[in-house]
Amino acid sequence: MSSTIEQTADLSRSEQQRAVEPYADTVIPAEVASEILTSVIARVLARTYEIEDSDPAEDARLTAIRQKLIAERRSIDVDTPAHNHAIAAKWGALLKDDTALWNELNG
């Protein structure tokens, strides 16, 4: 009798693990990539606020960059985990180095 209970408990753990794995492999990378891009967008927006009155041309340029970043964030989908990992790797590394981030954004 106890072996049946143990098998049922093992089955439940196994089923739970299978339910978590797809979530961990798809949803979490999408959320991480989205949060990273949101941080990049916030930095661009902060810079925009700093210069908006003094340099309209730079304001327009930064607004265009921000729009491209928003479009990239919209490309994140739970069905494309490799794409999401690539976004997180690229922009996550750049967030750690402000000079490299702005070099990338300035093209």
Image (cartoon, rainbow, N blue to C red):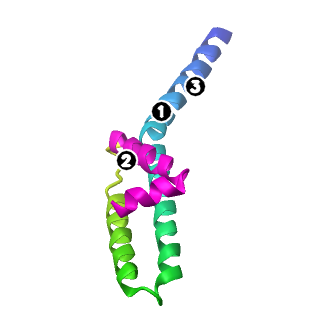
What crowding class fits label 1: few (fewer than 14 Cα within 10 Å), some (14-19), or many (20 or more)? few
Give the extent of the magenta segment.
81-107
Q: Is residue 56 visible?
A: yes
Q: Is residue 36 visible?
A: no
**Element under label 3?**
helix
Closer mark to the observer between disc 2 and disc 3: 2
Can you tell which mark lies on residue 78? 2
Question: Cα distance, mark 2 to mark 3?
Answer: 24 Å
* Residue tagged 1: 21
**Element under label 2?**
loop
**In the image, what residue occupies the spot 51% across and 68% down?**
42
Q: Identify the main secondary structure in magenta.
A: helix
Q: How many marks?
A: 3
**In the image, what residue occupies the spot 50% across and 74% down?**
47
**In the image, what residue occupies the spot 54% across and 21% down?**
11
Q: Determine the image quadrant of residue 59.
A: bottom left
What crowding class fits label 3: few (fewer than 14 Cα within 10 Å), some (14-19), or many (20 or more)? few
Q: Nearer the viewer, residue 19 or 74?
A: 74
Question: Cα distance, mark 2 to mark 1?
Answer: 13 Å
Q: Earlier in the sequence, mark 2 or mark 3?
A: 3
Name which residue type carries label 3.
Arg
Can you tell which mark lies on residue 13? 3
Name which residue type carries label 1.
Glu
Q: Are the two marked residues, 2 and 1, in contact with CB atoms closer than 8 angstroms?
A: no
Question: Cα distance, mark 1 to mark 3?
Answer: 12 Å
State yes or no: residue 105 in magenta: yes
Q: Earlier in the sequence, mark 1 or mark 3?
A: 3
